[in-house]
Amino acid sequence: MDSRARNLLDEALGLDQLTQLKPPLGGKAVLIEDCVETSGSFVLHQLIKRLLTAVPNSSNVVLFLAFANPFSHYDRILLGEEGKAGGRSGLFALFANITKVLNALPESNRKCLTIVIDDVSLMEVAAHGSSDHVLDFLHYCHTLTSDYGCSLVTLNHEDIYSSMDGLVFLKQMEYAADVLVKVEPLATGLAADVHGQFDGLQMTVLNRGSLNNRMSNFQFRIKENSVEYFYPGARA
Amino acid sequence: MAATKTRTSSFSRNLPAASSAQSPEIKCGPNGTFLVSSGIPDLDKTLGGGIPLGSLVMVMEDSEAPHHMLLLRNFMSQGLVHKQPLLYASPSKDPRGFLGTLPSPSSPKDDKSRSHDAEQEKGLRIAWQYKKYFGENQSNLDGQRGMILFRFIVLYNKQEFSNEFDLRRPLDRHFYTGQHVDCISTKDLPNIAALQERCTSFLSQFSRYICTFFAIDFVCFTNLLIVTFRNDATVACTGRIAIQSLCAPQCESSNMEWEMLSFIRSLKSTVRSANAVAIITFPSSLVSATFCKRWQHLADCLVSVKAIPDEDKELAKLLTGYQDIVGFLNIHRVPRINTQVPAVLEATTLSIKLQKRRYLVLECLNQAPVDGSSGSSYGTSGNCSGASSKSGSLDF
């Protein structure tokens, strides 16, 4: 049941066929959006766990920029850097560290690197509100996905960007992402059995020159060490 | 990399078998956390036993009524009664004067106001007496001569995890006149840095991690050693921070929104690695919507208070005990440290009542029975869980 249920999100993200040769997210940029009512950080945890444990002896590497919580909270992470970026120079230094890590990897393994950022709104706080610099930083990270084939996973809080100026920032991030995962509470309120739903998990796949848009809507229930995914009404 | 097979991390969510709460003021919570009381037993129960150490609690104020002060007062009094160091910041010119209005714990015998002073003791007092049993009372061991009967008299200490506070009785001066209470006024601070420094130096005495050592092998990323020496929570090492009306308009620094956020973020991370709890109340209606959301996301525990309109006939029909209710408490987020599983509460909206005008009580909302002619179904005790904002201000 677990391995089958896990595949709903894995299928949607293309993680169901992990091999040693193929990079895990295929060099994609994934944006996870959540809100105060329902946190999307569990998606980050599951992704990281999947990337690091799915294939034995794989060369998958996760570079984790944690702004939201100390590492003791992220129990499963093996490598990361605590986010202390301060202002523009801090972001430059952070990016320099990322490229240093990337260059330290053997060339063949560089596409197995996944950069995970938790979360972008706190990166803005760390940069004292210079959203433009944060966007630039994210764009630089995106260039890594095209230059080196590594992947990028970011978490952001959609409900913060409700004003006109904020909307532009959010839309730019959504535009740059290949995969958009929106985590929402249920419209009917809180429930012990269903903790929330994915609203239109979008995946834009470039396949031989054509764009395929895949939409998935399913619900989830978070457990201590795993997450159950199921279509509405289909939970056993 | 087979590194994932061998866990070299010393971080673990398992409850450490050896360490347990060393005093009744702290109890063990889930996922290796320790809990302290909010000063309101009903709120402790709703939050799953108490507030985890390391949490940042944020209270969204209602500009129409000062109900957040009820929460703040009880929180501060609970800490002082437990002799936990306190840092209090407020926009008034004389924050120390506020301490005189904190409530005192209510005792079962209300007349003896000083009786508990002499009986503040930690630990158990055990007294036993030996009594030679000479057959006066038949024992079930055949009444042998020379048998010594031990009688243990155990006197329980008076400290409890959580107290009921009497809002009409002020706290005794000796609770807050010591060195362990620090007050700061935020009114005339030109920027938030001074407050940040005071918080950081205050929290440094409760550091949970004495030393953390990282060693990373950059070549193959397989070897990561994290050694952490922990300081288990004891009463002397547990602190409370209470910040009232942060970003209140009368404060000079109130328009420095990014600085405020930066301060909250840094306070959150410092509190997380300390044996302390911080509570911040803020006027959410006076902060821009965007920043209000950012503040909300930073909270480990997020609650809001709302005034109840007087003489509202619709509400009076809808709720039982309407005349006793002074406001509503809405719980938006429950602290979840070291776990990803969200807490789903039976009721997210509680009514705030003052029993006998002295005791703060939080109750689930009870919908009054509706007569059959209106066609509505009878309401039973409210399982108020609802995230829908369209149904109005009350979540049933």
Image: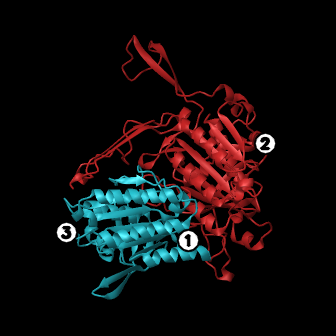
| Location of residue B99 in the rendering, given as x and y in whole percent from the top left corner | 74, 40
Residue at disc 3, secondary structure: loop
Mark 1 and mark 2 in contact? Answer it, CB < 8 Å.
no
Q: Earlier in the sequence, mark 3 or mark 1?
A: 3
Q: Residue at x 71, y 42 (%)?
A: B184
- Seen from the viewer's position, the closer of residues B243 and B253 is B253
Q: Secondary structure at mark 1?
A: helix
* Residue located beneath label 2 in the image: B94
Spatial CA span between label 3 and label 1: 38 Å
For disc 1, the marked residue is: A159
Percent coordinates x, y for residue B372 in the rendering: 66, 80
Residue located farthest toward the bottom when viewing the structure as drawn: A210
Give the number of the mark in front: 3 or 1. 3
Q: Which shade of the palette goes to chain A?
A: cyan
Q: Position of residue B64 (x, y in %)?
A: 77, 62
Examine the image and state in which quarter residue A118 appears.
bottom left
Which residue in the rendered view is the most extreme toward the top?
B146
For this rendering, which residue is in front, B124 or B255? B255
Q: Chain of mark 3?
A: A
Q: Is residue B79 left or right of residue A103?
A: right
